[in-house]
Amino acid sequence: MNQTDKKLGIIYTAFAYLLWGFLPIYWKLVDNVPAGVILAHRIVWSFVFMIAVILSVRKWPGFIQECKAIFKNKKKLFGITTASIVISINWLTYIWAVNNGHVIQASLGYYINPLISILLGIIILKERLTRRQLLSFLVAAIGVINLAVSYGVFPWISLLLAISFGLYGLLKKTVDIGAMFGLAIETMIVTPIALIYLIAIPNHVLTMDSLFTSTSLLLIGAGVATAVPLLLFASGAKQIPLSMVGFLQYIAPTIMLLLGVFLYHETFSRAHLVSFSLIWIALIIYMSSAQRRPLKRVEKRMSS
C-alpha cells in the first residue's frame, strides 16, 4: 500500500463519515412524511440506484453470478435476508429518531455501537475479552444507566440503533460480500415489501403529478444519500488500517451530537454530559486496548 492510496483511503472514509454525520439534515427535510414511508422509498430508490451503478460500471454479469451463488447457498441466503431486515429496522429507528427530535439519542447509539459489536463478537464468535475491554463495557454501561435513571426513561433508541447495527455487521461477516453487490441484494430482498407497503398506504405512491415536487425528489434522492457514503466507505476502508477506520468512525456521531445540540436545540442536560463523558472514556479505553495488541505482536516478532 503506497502513501497516495493511504491518503485517498483516509479522504474517502472520512468523507463517508461526514456524509453520515450530516444525514439528519436530509431526513429533517422530509419530516412531514411518516418514517415508514421514508424507509420504503429509501429501500426502493437505493435498489434502483445500485442497479444503475452496477450497469454503469459493467458489473451486471458479476452481480447475476453473485445472486445465483447466494440463492443456492441456504446459509448465505438466510444471512443476507436477516441482514436486510436488521438494517431496515436500523434505518427506520434512525429516521424516526431524527424526525421526532431525538438526534442526540441517535448519536449516543452510534457511540455505543463499537462496544456492542465487540460484545456480540464475544458472545457469538467466542472472542476473548481483555481487561481493558471489560472495563470499557462497565464504564459505558454506567453511562447508559445514568441516563436512564436521571430521566426515568430507558434509552431504547440508542440501544436499538447500536444493537441492530452491531448485528448487521456480524451478519455481513457470515455472508462476506462486497459493498456494491451487498447493498443491491439487501435492498432487492426487501424492495417487494417496501412496494407493497407504499401501494397499501394512500397518497404515498409517486405519480406523474407528484413526481417533481420537492418532497418527491428528496424521497427519490434518499437512494443516492444511502448508497454514496457506503460506496465511499467501501473504497476507502480497504486502503487504510482498521485502527484508522476505528478512529474515523466517531466523526459521524460527533456531528450528529453537535447538530442535535446547536442546530435543533435538543435538551443537553448535566445528565447527558455525564453519560456522554462516560461513553467517551469507555471508547478511549477501548481504543487504547485495540492499539496495544498490534504493538505486542510487533514486540513478539522482534524478540523471536
Image (tube, rainbow, N blue to C red):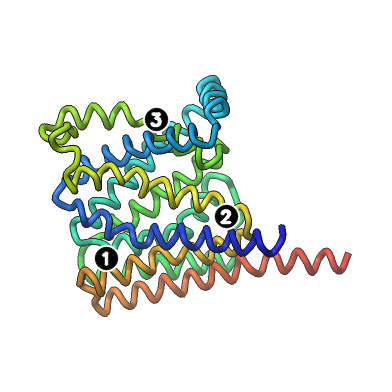
Query: Within the image, what quadrant is residue 273 found in?
Result: bottom left
Image point (52%, 59%), residue name: 13
Residue type at mark 2: give it: Ala
Q: Is residue 76 left or right of residue 205?
A: right
Q: Are marks 2 and 3 in contact (CB under 8 Å)?
A: no
Residue 225 coordinates in the image, percent (x, y): 36, 49
Residue 34 coordinates in the image, percent (x, y): 17, 45
Image point (47%, 29%), residue name: 78
Residue type at mark 1: give it: Ala
Query: Within the image, what quadrant is residue 168 found in?
Result: top left
Mark toward the start of the polypeptide (1 vs 3): 1
Cα distance, mark 2 to mark 1? 35 Å
Q: Are marks 1 and 3 in contact (CB under 8 Å)?
A: no
The residue carrying pointer 2 sits among few (fewer than 14), some (14 to 19) or many (20 or more) residues within 10 Å by Cα, namely many
Mark toward the start of the polypeptide (2 vs 1): 1
Q: Are marks 2 and 1 in contact (CB under 8 Å)?
A: no
- Element class at badge 1: helix
Image point (31%, 60%), residue name: 106
Cα distance, mark 1 to mark 3? 38 Å
Q: Which mark is in front, 1 or 3?
A: 3
Q: Is residue 294 left or right of residue 138?
A: right
Residue type at mark 3: give it: Met
Residue 4 coordinates in the image, percent (x, y): 66, 62
Instruction: Point out the residue furthest to the right here.
Output: 304
The image's mark for residue 237 is 2
| Residue 191 vertical position relative to residue 68 in the rendered view, above or below | below
The residue carrying pointer 3 sits among few (fewer than 14), some (14 to 19) or many (20 or more) residues within 10 Å by Cα, namely many
- Element class at badge 2: helix
| Residue picked out by circle 3 | 188
- Position of the N terminus, as image quadrant, is bottom right
Mark toward the start of the polypeptide (2 vs 3): 3
| Residue picked out by circle 1 | 148
